[in-house]
Image: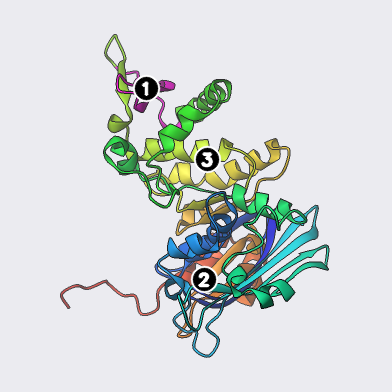
Amino acid sequence: MIVSRLELKNWRNFRAVDVPLSDRVFIVGPNASGKSNLLDALRFLRDIAKPGGGLQRAISQRGGLSKIRCLAARREPEVEIAVELSEGGEVKWRYEIGIGQQQRGYRQPVLTYERVFQAGKSIVLRPDQFDAKDEERKTQTHLEQIGSNQHFREIARFFESIRYLHLVPQFLRTADSLQSSSAGDDPFGRSFLETVVKTPEKTRRRRLAQIERALKEAVPQLKDLKVEKDETGIPHLEATYTHWRPNAGRQREDQFSDGTIRLIGLFWSLLDGEAPLLLEEPELSLHNAIVSKLPSLFYRLRKTKKTKRQIFVSTHSFDILSEKSIGGEEVVLLQPDAEGTIATVASSIKEVRNLLDAGFSVGDAALPHTKPSGLRQLDLFG
């Protein structure tokens, strides 16, 4: 399945969003336009559905309802999210959730509604008669409850499977000196090596061999990539770097370049399962020649999977978007406005569509629309 439509209302800096989505989704926009926030709507659903998660925990991890409610929301303070999940081009599921706050008492976040549709037929419609008798029930979703989601557990499993990794090389190098995330989430790769070493050995060796083969084009001196534990039990990336010396040098991740570490994390994420994958600015620390190959890599990877894995990419990179295979329907363009960011599929903008029809790339046609208005010289001392 893929997320084929995303609808948001009063979510972070989005007053209203309604965009169809494809197998590959490229999210582009100026700084602070909401690229990360758009991806976080999917992470939020994942955090509700995953074991040990739930609605209250997902909201508290984000600082409370006031932190995720759009500042432009005035008379309509509810936060609303709806997604459609499709398979084979047909909408299989639709999940909708509305969130408000208790008017008195503990002022907890509560459901204003929760709805589930299967092939257009309603199977969950809350609040129901039981919610009317017990208001505390509204503090939890049916999505997070095994006893309540048996008829749509496929949705819960799908949300739970969503993967997100924005690996920060500095965190990986110093992971043994950093505390684990209290939220139970690890978006920046602090426990990335723990995840790798816990992978079944046969799978781990196969993936590392694939990554090594791919890395040789970008880092030709690297070979024999492994993950090994040191004498204290802490896992480390290790590889041999060949050079002019007779005996090649063995190095660990603290000696790897940022680009090498990010490529290893990116490749591992791409090989790790078939769930939707959320990538933020994968171009960071990488040479533009490597960056330009990423869209075709995503496409080839999907072709090798039994199911087409959906990949979301937020990016500023012209090199990524210069790939001619990227269609305007695969690009969500964010444009800040006085009442919140507007999200539009690039192909629905006439000017962009005309340029694409004339043979221009999405980078040529859509990126100019993401340029901050009034940008001149960033003059600090004018």
Name the residue at 15% across, 75% down. 381
User: Cβ–Cβ below 8 Å for labels 1 and 2?
Assistant: no
Q: How crowded is mark 2: few (under 14 residues within 10 Å), some or many (20 or more)?
A: many
Closer to the camera in the image, 160 or 21: 160
Name the residue at 62% across, 64% down. 141
Q: Where is residue 51 in the image (x, y as percent from the top left)?
A: 56, 49
Name which quarter of the figure residue 233 lies in: top left
Q: Position of residue 128 (x, y in %)?
A: 73, 74
Earlier residue among tags 1 and 2? 1
Query: Would residue 128 be found to the left or right of residue 6 on screen?
Result: right
Name the residue at 69% across, 35% down. 304
Magenta region, residue range = 217-243
Closer to the camera in the image, 251 or 236: 236
Name which quarter of the figure residue 95 lies in: bottom right
Which residue has dot 2 on it? 334
Which residue has dot 1 on it? 229
Is residue 345 in sight in this rendering?
no
Image: 134 above or below 22: below
Query: Would residue 251 be found to the left or right of residue 81 on screen?
Result: left
Name of the residue lying farthest toward the bottom:
75
Which residue has dot 3 on it? 269
Closer to viewer: mark 1 or mark 2 = 1
Q: Which amino acid does label 3 sit on?
A: Ser
Image: 221 above or below 293: above
User: Cβ–Cβ below 8 Å for labels 2 and 3?
Assistant: no
Name which quarter of the figure residue 270 lies in: top right
